[in-house]
Image: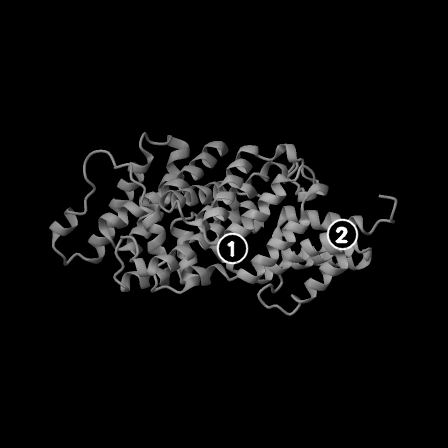
């Protein structure tokens, strides 16, 4: 039953944005449609593992969600003419095989919403993340995120948004938000923010699928190509990132023969073409850094000088604490661990990093390389306490424990 449940969850995650997009295109009323689709998904999650997946799962979900929507309309708007309700009945025959996911993405990024609400609503409606997962990504309580998503749906309704592509004047900004959302979905799948598993394959697969769809719509956009390349090049390492029992394997210790050569080739070709023909952007630079890692036959052969130069460009183009944190690692590889630690010192007072475990983890790594075992052990333990990912926590604790041993006796 567990396998059937997992398969059902994956199918529902892929179908959810398609079904929601179709309902909103037919009926408008985004908030009501989203509630109706959630009820249909819940019903499917309960019924399909036991009864089997219907021949046309998308049509099943559309029918059930539409009936829920009609019930809602009848309950709340009984005074309206009955023929308006009847007109909302699903048409007979098969459901058209049309994917409205992209239009749904743009709707969720409506300018009436604040950027955090745009991201949260898109993650919920099109990305398949639960409210709890989104709350974890934003480091806020689940109840707070639930209220934010509810308010976002109401604002879309109040703004009179229609289920159509955005006007030209708004497209660039809403595309930027869409790409950021897809980036967050992928990151949550590649390194889950909490729980027993390092990966959530269904999320990375969905992020890649949606980004491929955006790339098909905007084939000449360098940043879309860069984001898709970044995802492919990063996901190519997934099989080598854990041991058979789920323990985390750091990049320098991974078996590179297990990296996905086809994904690396596709990602490298995408970023090479984008860098040659498009305006330079942050996703292209991140993809270029991933490509340098992917092309190194061994860790020792990694071109860290090139990576450092790329991080320098990225920090000028899109400055941020995570970029600086990653640049510190490259600085340490090129100029030594003490130089990297000096870069980390510039982040000590940065409130945007807050209690993020990666700052302590990187500091611990560089302190260990610099020979300060006691300080490195303390930093590894601090990082382990700060993360809610069990594989990361166990890895950091192992590193701390190893530094408690007598040098040369490990």
Instruction: Give the residue furthest to the front.
Output: 276
Q: Is residue 186 left or right of residue 159?
A: right
Identity of the residue drawn at 27% across and 64% down = 158
Q: Residue 141: horizontal and vertical position, in percent? A: 50, 61
Q: Identify the disc placed on residue 400.
A: 2
Indicate the secondary structure of the residue bearing disc 1: helix
Q: Quadrant of the C terminus?
A: top right
Q: Residue 359: horizontal and vertical position, in percent? A: 66, 59
Between 302 and 208, which is closer to the camera in this rendering?
302
Identity of the residue drawn at 57% across and 34% down = 260
Q: Earlier in the sequence, mark 2 or mark 1?
A: 1
Identity of the residue drawn at 34% across and 57% down = 171
Could you tell me if residue 310 is visible in this image? yes
Question: Would you call the spot at circle 1 few (<14 residues within 10 Å), some (14-19), or many (20 or more)?
Answer: many
Q: Which residue is mark 1?
A: 282
Q: Residue 223: horizontal and vertical position, in percent? A: 46, 51
Q: Is residue 166 left or right of residue 289?
A: left
Indicate the secondary structure of the residue bearing disc 2: helix
Q: Tell me: residue 140, above or below residue 11.
A: below
Q: Nearer the viewer, mark 2 or mark 1?
A: 1
Q: Quadrant of residue 301?
A: top right
């Amino acid at each position: 039953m567990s396998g059937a449940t997992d398969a059902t969850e994956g199918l529902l995650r892929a179908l959810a944005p398609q079904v929601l997009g179709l309902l909103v295109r037919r009926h408008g009323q985004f908030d009501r449609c989203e509630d109706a689709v959630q009820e249909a998904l819940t019903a499917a999650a309960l019924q399909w593992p036991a009864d089997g997946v219907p021949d046309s799962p998308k049509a099943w979900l559309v029918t059930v969600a539409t009936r829920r929507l009609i019930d809602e309309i009848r309950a709340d708007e009984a005074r309206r003419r009955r023929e308006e309700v009847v007109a909302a009945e699903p048409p007979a025959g098969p459901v058209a095989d049309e994917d409205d996911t992209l239009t749904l993405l743009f709707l969720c990024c409506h300018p009436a919403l604040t950027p955090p609400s745009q991201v949260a609503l898109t993650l919920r409606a099109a990305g398949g993340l639960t409210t709890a997962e989104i709350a974890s990504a934003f480091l806020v309580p689940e109840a707070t995120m639930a209220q934010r998503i509810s308010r976002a749906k109401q604002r879309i309704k109040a703004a009179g948004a229609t289920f159509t592509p955005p006007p030209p004047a708004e497209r660039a900004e809403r595309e930027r938000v869409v790409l950021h959302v897809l980036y967050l979905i992928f990151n949550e799948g590649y390194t889950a923010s909490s729980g027993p598993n390092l990966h959530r394959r269904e999320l990375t697969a969905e992020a890649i699928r949606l980004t491929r769809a955006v790339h098909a719509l905007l084939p000449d956009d360098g940043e879309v190509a860069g984001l898709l390349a970044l995802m492919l090049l990063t996901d190519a390492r997934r099989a080598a990132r854990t041991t058979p029992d789920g323990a985390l394997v750091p990049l320098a210790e991974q078996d590179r023969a297990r990296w996905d050569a086809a994904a690396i080739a596709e990602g490298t070709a995408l970023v090479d073409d984008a860098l040659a023909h498009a305006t330079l952007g942050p996703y292209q630079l991140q993809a270029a850094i991933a490509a340098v890692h992917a092309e190194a036959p061994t860790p020792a052969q990694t071109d860290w000088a090139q990576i450092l130069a790329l991080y320098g460009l990225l920090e000028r183009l899109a400055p941020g604490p995570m970029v600086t944190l990653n640049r510190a690692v490259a600085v340490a590889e090129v100029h030594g661990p003490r130089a990297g630690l000096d870069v980390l010192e510039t982040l000590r007072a940065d409130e945007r990093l807050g209690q993020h475990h990666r700052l302590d983890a990187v500091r611990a790594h560089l302190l260990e390389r610099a020979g300060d075992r006691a300080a490195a052990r303390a930093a590894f333990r601090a990082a382990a306490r700060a993360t809610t990912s069990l594989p990361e926590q166990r890895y950091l604790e192992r590193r701390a424990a190893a530094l408690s041993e007598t040098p040369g006796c490990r």
